[in-house]
Image (cartoon, rainbow, N blue to C red):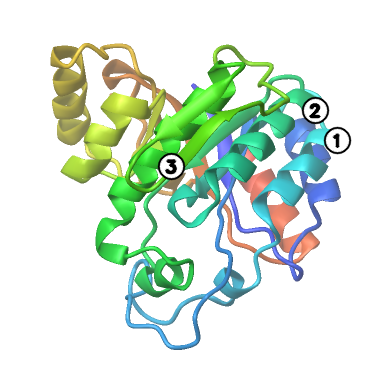
Amino acid sequence: MQIGVVLFVTDETIAPAVLGPALEERGFESVFVPEHSHIPASRESPAPGGGELPRHFHRTIDVFVTLSVLAATTTDLVLGTGVALPAERDPIHTAKQVASLDLVSGGRALFGVGAGWNREEARDHGVDPRRRGKVLDEKLAAMRRIWTEELAEFHGEYVDFGPMYCWPKPVTSPYPPIAVGGESDAALRRLRDHGDVWLPDRVDLETFRRVRSWLADEGRPDLPFTVFGADADTLDPTGLGEVGVDRIAFWVESGPEPDVLRQLDAIAARWLD
């Protein structure tokens, strides 16, 4: 079982250049960095988990800048967006950023994606929140074409471009793994159609078995599962391997360098020794 972490990196937390080496020194396999372009001041969307929205949501460093620093300061760490919000992004620029990260890291990029919970954030990007899942699906399809075709062309409802060249192509063939977050029917269809890894954010063995059986029926029997944002103190790993979980990414509370390093030490002592 591979062990990684999920944490928000902001202007107030541990620096990416310190974080990457600290993870590798302790034996972590991967890191996932969430994305928010901004948080609208007027917000009706409830915060994940309820209550007040934590401060770190407001202050995230750009996810690809963060992962590029992590790439430059590590040698083996898998570098994941966890998750990026491609519905809010330009697909051509994003395709280039993902491919560039994969190139400069020597094939260590992992493109975690989701539709996003903040409807106001999507609206600020000109995306109808009610249709953000469909926008995401089409942008993923367009990016896959950019990554895999020398002369790429795409004509859809939300993305439209004529024949074009876009380099670099990813080092990873045919493209970096797409890890799909979410457990809704729409998210699972996205996993089937575009995904290479599933990122469930809660542990439920019965759900995992059901999804595994459904994926087999849909012709995707071998997709790996990553338990995403787990609690290192309470997670029971019993049965996870049997349902196809091959990675656990533990939640690390954002904070200054000493606090994050203490958390990494505690997770490593429990799960990596």
Closest to the observer, 74 or 150: 150
Answer yes or no: do the residues labelled 2 and 1 have beta carbons within 8 Å?
A: yes
- Up the image or down, 137 lies above or below 254; here it is above
> Along the polypeptide, which appears first: circle 2 or circle 1?
1
Q: Which labelled disc corresponds to residue 228?
A: 3
Q: Which of marks 1 and 3 is nearer the N terminus?
A: 1
Q: Can residue 227 be seen in this view?
A: no
Q: Where is residue 207 in the image (x, y as percent from the top left)?
A: 17, 35
Residue at the spot of label 2: 104
Residues packed near mark 3 inside 10 Å, few (<14), some (14 to 19) or many (20 plus): many
Tell me the quarter of the image containing the C terminus: top right
Q: Nearer the viewer, residue 151 or 1?
A: 151
Name the residue: 81% across, 56% down: 15
Distance between the alpha carbons at the discs numbered 3 and 2:
25 Å
Contact between marks 3 and 2 (CB within 8 A): the answer is no
The crowd level at tag 2 (other Cα within 10 Å; few <14, some 14-19, many 20+) is some
Residue type indicated by callout 1: Ala
Q: Which of marks 1 and 3 is in front?
A: 1
Residue identifier under label 1? 72
Q: How many labels does the image show?
A: 3
The answer to whether any part of residue 166 appears in the image is yes
Residue at image x 24%, y 35%?
188
Which SS class for mark 1?
helix
Q: Distance of mark 1 from mark 3, alpha carbons?
A: 24 Å
Q: Residue at x 21, y 21 (%)?
A: 212
Q: Which mark is residue 218?
A: none
